[in-house]
Image (cartoon, rainbow, N blue to C red):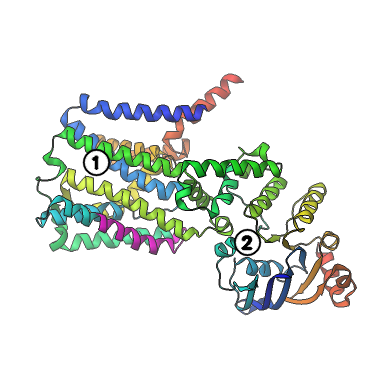
Amino acid sequence: MHILKTVGVSRSFGKFTAVNAVDLHILATGIHALIGPNGAGKSTLLNLLAGTLPVSSGCIYYEGRDVTRLPIHARARIGISRSYQVVTLFAGLTCREAMQLALQRDLSVAAWLSPGPMRKVREDADELLKAVDLFDVAEVDTAELSHGLQKHLEIALALANSSRLLLLDEPMAGMSISERVVLANRVRALAKDRAIVLVEHDIDMVMSLADTVTVLHNGAVIASGDPADVRADSMAQSVYLQAGKAC
Amino acid sequence: MVNALSKSWSLAISAVFLSVLPLVLPDYYLYLATELLIWALFALSLDLLLGYTGLPSFGHAIFFGIPAYAVGIILTAGYPLIVALLVAVVAASLTGLILGYLATRTGGIGYIIVTLLASFAVFLIAFSWTNLTGGENGLYISRAGTLAALSTQAAYAIVAVSTALIFLGARWLVRSNYGLLLVGIKTNETRAQAMGYNTQLYKFQITIVSAMIAGVAGVLYALLARSLSAELVGPELSTEAVIWVLLGGTQTLLGPMLGAALFILIKQALNTIRAYPIFLGLLFIVVVVWAPSGLLKLPKGLWKSFRRRNTR
């Protein structure tokens, strides 16, 4: 069962085609990694899926529905969440407040203004922070967290509204080896009941983590399949060897 | 805990201060205090946009002046006060809708330019449409049916109660989850959108709320001062209001209100000196350098550094 399909999705910036007629099939569960050398169009493709950028041509279907023209906030409401390559959370807000912000989304404006629901959102935020081991820093400004904790919180925020498709843009970037292992395990666990699309440079990490790998080169898909098949593909090999050097 | 306590203390002190004023102040100063409360209310409305939502409105006088003119024009045409008030409400909402729609479609610098240019445009219209606004000569509202027909104490009471109620409402708003979203939009709009918030919509909504509050201030001003000129919608008042908010401390509600009162008092005290804007400029520089979060947060900052020195 596919949760997301793209049909001939392209994106150009002036004369430069960053993403070129990409057909992508994302399963409802598991990790789908997008790899390729710098400038292959991985991040652009992720932005097209999230709605951060509009497509130049092609269509995006989410759960059978055409979402091509849906703005980012509307896509978020139907279950598409994303993380950013550079984590910038809400400077000036505490972790608890950021979590409340994520949780209160589906309530009405009237509920935002009423003491009862406000208390409930706060309690739920604390529950969720406890569940992801962030309760100790509930009162801390999100901008003052360590890089690892920020990434951790970012994913917790993206999941607060039980999203079914999680788009992660280089989640491992800037992390220590031990932090990477923790995050990889968490992503692995999350992928059991939702779809995760991952853009990642660390080829070894991707090959051990992903269920499906799509290799992009100059904006186009040159190979797609399970990691073993992609590894055997001669064309993909030449590209990701190049990428391996770049890292 | 200490924070919450000091906050309710400052509320109690403000309430006592406002109730004692009419008992101790002679009429002239009480009138001045009434006017300061109106400007404080105007500053509060701007803090909702500038301080809480990060919308740099440089045309805020429009929201103050247009409803003020609406009341003036309708009263001068001989209609009763209630009609004038209704027209003012319509004028305030229309202004909020139109300018809010135009301005929130742009972000950052664009927002500043749209609002500032709108203020220039409305100023020119008010200045040149002599039949409607009195143009250069201004518009004078006759005394009957205005706040000026009441005793100074009664006028003060009406303005003080309106200001206090609106302040409490605004305080409730910014402390609610709605206020949390506003601050979220200010600090990271892109992420707020990625979370599923149509930030455009909420920026539009708060612009209208802010316009309505500024409109109340404008109407009270028209009914108290009874003399309206194009400056009330112009860029000078608009930018001065931004300074009040920055001076008192953004995102505090009370700070901008105090900032407005302080700025106007200093301006009045100094206006016998020709070069008085220099002193206001110096004050502003002092605040920006030594109390960048505004005067309201200055005591807290000093107290912190004092305690740090003592515990060392």
Dot 1: few (<14), some (14–19), or many (≥20) neighbours within 10 Å? few
* Residue B266 appears left or right of B302: left
Write down the quadrant of residue A44 in the picture. bottom right
- Report the chain holding disc 1: B
Q: Which mark is residue A199?
A: none
The answer to whether residue B80 is above or below residue A92 is below
Write down the quadrant of residue A84 in the picture. bottom right
Which stretch appears magenta?
B89-110
Q: Residue at x 62, y 52 (%)?
A: A88
Please tell me whether mark 1 sits on a helix, a strand or a loop: loop
* Residue B308 appears left or right of B65: right
The residue singled out by tag 1 in the image is B274
Residue A19 place in picture, x, y as percent: 68, 75
The answer to whether residue B278 is above or below residue B57 is above
Q: Residue at x 25, y 49 (%)?
A: B218
- Indicate yes or no whether the magenta region holds residue A168: no
Q: Residue at x 18, y 43 (%)?
A: B224
* Residue B223 appears left or right of A13: left
Write down the quadrant of residue B143 in the picture. top left
The answer to whether residue A63 is above or below residue B7 is below
Whether pointer 1 and pointer 2 mark residues with C-beta atoms closer than 8 Å, the reply is no
Residue A51 or residue B115, whichever sits in front: A51
Residue A111 or residue B128, whichever sits in front: A111
Instruction: Give the amino acid at mark 2.
Output: Gly
